Amino acid sequence: MKEIKSYLKELTIVTIGVLIALIISNFKENNQARDYYNSSIETVKNEVEVNNSILKNIIESQTRLLDTINKHSADHITISDLIVEKGGGLPVATLNNLGLEFYKNNQLNSVDFEMMSSLIRMQSISRIIDTKMEKLMDFVYPNLFVDSEESKKLVSLYLNNVLNSEIQLMHTYEDFINEYVENKNNTE
């Protein structure tokens, strides 16, 4: 009987030790997962803020270019000279959506669906902007040395179409920043 008690005592000690080790390991894994989640969210927030800043500058430049095109559309000047010399060039927004991809691919077990929805909306609008910009460039390149008023008006329409989507994306960025960045800063 003493041997059985001794055996049960040792088994209990070992079992308690294993349970304590599992609890500590689980706690450590949960902390690492939380830290990973928080750092990925911070990455996404920083990316959105940077994209918003870039987009604001692009919108300002493109708006000036649009005004220049509209002002000089009747002048005898080629589209190339109008865009490059008078308008200062055609800036294109290069925006990152890596944070969204990272968030979508790695955080499915702890998804904030409202945040995910906002990020997917941003990605969709970015793709629309890319498509509209491609259409603008598809028109501009073969018509670089044309100086017809109709062609300049078409460039203006294409550029205005791109600008409308960029402004929509900028508002989406600002909504995200107001919801997720400024609210967090106010609660800290």
Image: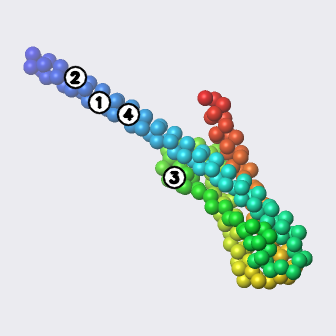
Give me the residue at 66% from left, 35% from top: 183
State which quadrant residue 150 falls in: bottom right
Residue 12's label in the rendered image is 2
- Where residue 109 appears, as percent x and y from the top left, is 50, 44
Nearer the observer: mark 4 or 2; the answer is: 4
Mark 3: secondary structure = helix
Nearer the observer: mark 1 or 4; the answer is: 4
Residue 141's label in the rendered image is none
Earlier-in-chain disc, 1 versus 3: 1
Amino acid marked by disc 1: Ala
Mark 2: secondary structure = helix
Nearer the observer: mark 1 or 3; the answer is: 3
- Where residue 28 appears, as percent x and y from the top left, is 38, 34
**Vertical placement of 4 versus 77: above or below?**
above
Amino acid marked by disc 2: Thr
**Vertical placement of 96 versus 147: above or below?**
above
Mark 4: secondary structure = helix
- Location of mark 4 (residue): 28
Where's the C terminus, which quadrant?
A: top right
Nearer the observer: mark 2 or 3; the answer is: 3
Which one is in front, 179 or 104?
179
Amino acid marked by disc 3: Phe
Q: For mark 1, does the 10 Å Cα neighbourhood hold few (<14), some (14 to 19), or many (20 or more) residues?
A: few
Distance of label 1 from label 3 (alpha carbons): 32 Å
